Amino acid sequence: KAGVTQTPRYLIKTRGQQVTLSCSPISGHRSVSWYQQTPGQGLQFLFEYFSETQRNKGNFPGRFSGRQFSNSRSEMNVSTLELGDSALYLCASSLQGAPKEQYFGPGTRLTVT
Amino acid sequence: AQRVTQPEKLLSVFKGAPVELKCNYSYSGSPELFWYVQYSRQRLQLLLRHISRESIKGFTADLNKGETSFHLKKPFAQEEDSAMYYCALMETSGSRLTFGEGTQLTVNP
């Protein structure tokens, strides 16, 4: 099976702009989770979607949002970008049920200038 | 709230030596624990999960509920084991992974 794919792989944006990142899960996986990875804060959970519904949300401001489509593909959006949003954004997919193994994509490297 | 602590940011050993990467957690319920590994320029990938009690690439990890630890061990380290290792906890009824800060393991020849 093809792994989790994320597009684009690299992105440079300016403060104040907005950005949309895309994630395609492994075929058959219905749960998609997003994580932010930075040198200072490490890996932090953003949110998780299952069957087009947000099931879980981390401690991030409302500028961070996401959605999931009927084919399980997911997008996350960050509005009004700040310099501190520069990070590697990881998407992970998993099957419903236990064990809840998550399979990660390569990430999107976002740089905000 | 759950928390995962990896006390060593950097760990360096020689090839053939035993290695132990420490992980401690705090969680009020019965967690599911994982070890993830990230090799240079590769994606984060699952190494071990505590419920399977299997050995992957010679690594094992035992959940000690009394000490709230899930240390990763390998009796004889190899150079190809050099990577960043993350311990992670998932709450029983959830889907959120809480990661530790990670340990960069370097195996010297």
Image: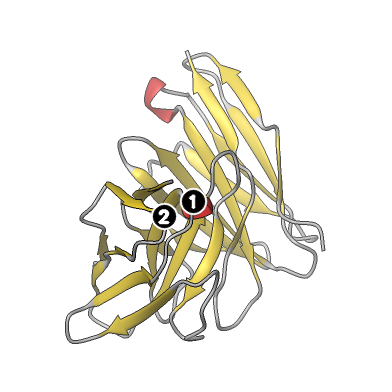
Q: Residue furthest left?
A: B67
Q: Secondary structure at mark 2?
A: loop
Q: Position of residue B25 (x, y in %)?
A: 24, 70
Q: Quadrant of residue B2?
A: bottom left
Amino acid at pointer 2: Lys
Q: Is residue B38 left or right of residue B22?
A: right
Q: Amino acid at mark 1?
A: Glu
Residue B61, x across and y down, in percent: 38, 77
- Closer to the camera, A75 or B97? B97
Q: Secondary structure at mark 1?
A: helix
Q: Earlier in the sequence, mark 2 or mark 1?
A: 2
The numbered dot on residue A12 is none
Q: CA distance from mark 2 to mark 1?
A: 6 Å
Based on the displayed image, in which of its 4 quarters is residue B1 positioned?
bottom left
Residue A23, placed above or below residue B96: above
Q: Dot 2 corresponds to which residue? A: B15
Q: Quadrant of the N terminus of chain A?
A: bottom right
Residue at image coords 56%, 31%: A109
Q: Would residue B31 be visible to someone looking at this image?
A: no
Residue located beneath label 1 in the image: B79
Crowding around mark 1 (Cα neighbors within 10 Å: few <14, some 14 to 19, many 20+) is some
Residue plotted at (48% across, 40% down): A64
Chain identity of mark 1: B
Q: How many marks?
A: 2
B44 relative to B69, above or below:
above
Question: Label 2: few (<14), some or many (≥20) within 10 Å?
Answer: some
**Up-down: is A27 above or below B42?**
below
Residues under numbered marks 2 and 1 in contact, where contact means CB atoms less than 8 Å apart? yes
The spot of residue B95 in percent (x, y) is 49, 70
